Amino acid sequence: MSSDHQKTTGTSDPNSDLLSIVIASVDYRLAPEHRLPAAYDDAMVALHWIKDLRDDWLTNFSDFSNCFIMGESAGGNIAYHAGLRAAAVADDLLPLKIKGLVLDEPGFGGSKRTGSELRLANDSRLPTFVLDLIWELSLPMGADRDHEYCNPTAESESSNSFGKIRSLGWKVMVVGCHGDPMIDRQMELAERFEKKGVDVVAHFDVGGYHAVKLEDPEKAKQFFVILKKFVDSCTIKI
């Protein structure tokens, strides 16, 4: 889920032929005019809109029983929080059935610097001061980077929802690379899902940089291959 989602997954992308899917991209409200949780609210509105949609084309060519919530970068953060919310109201979303979450280089932070944030403090794409500014403009007024919207180790929102995700049988894929300042937080999130008993698929490449797939066609192709494998593993019954 991202307002720029079509740049990487639109029909013009040759890699999209690897997947037989229908994509609904959420044009969510942006900070600082609309601080979090506005984007999460918009994601949930979109899910309910799809659930209630009476469209012949979608009815004939899509499968509402095999759905995924996916996001890249900021969209990965939104997909995570929308996933927690969706899991809590799964019955209310029927006939929409979510099978899993795809968190592609999800954006997270925290007050205490991680090793990767220190190592890549002067990263040419996402230096520390830019990440800090993003959170300052996005979080609720008065909140710091340990707010649950930013820091995935915050327990208040996720504690019960992880169990719900597990009981629903959802799978979670977390994708990242070691050239991303946020890689340590992405890896930590994957570990937390796993410790809660959630079926997790993690892909963390050596090197690279945040949003490398936008500039490297080979990396983009590799992502679509692992995405197809993940989707198939959630939807194909053996």
Image: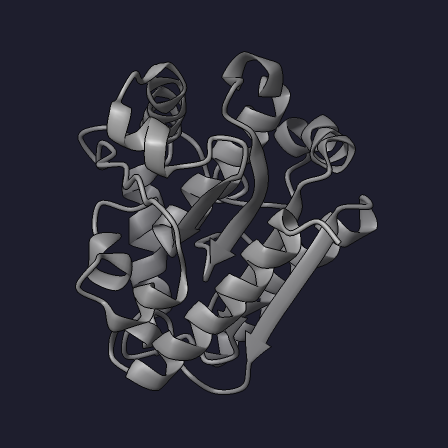
As drawn, 185 above or below 183: above
Residue 171 x, y percent position in the rendering? 66, 48
Residue 70 x, y percent position in the rendering? 44, 47
Rendered residue at 58%/17% (across/down):
89
> In this orientation, which residue lies closer to the viewer: 11 or 30?
11
As drawn, 208 above or below 185: below
Residue 100 x, y percent position in the rendering? 59, 44
Q: From where the camera sits, is residue 95 visible?
A: yes
The quarter of the picture where residue 187 lies is bottom right
Name the side, left or right, on which 131 lies relative to 164: left
Rendered residue at 25%/72% (across/down):
14
Rendered residue at 51%/52% (across/down):
102
Q: From where the camera sits, is residue 109 visible?
A: no
- Image quadrant occupied by the C terminus: bottom right
Name the side, left or right, on which 77 lies relative to 92: left
**Residue furthest toward the front?**
60
> In this orientation, which residue lies closer to the viewer: 135 or 166?
166
- Image quadrant occupied by the N terminus: top left
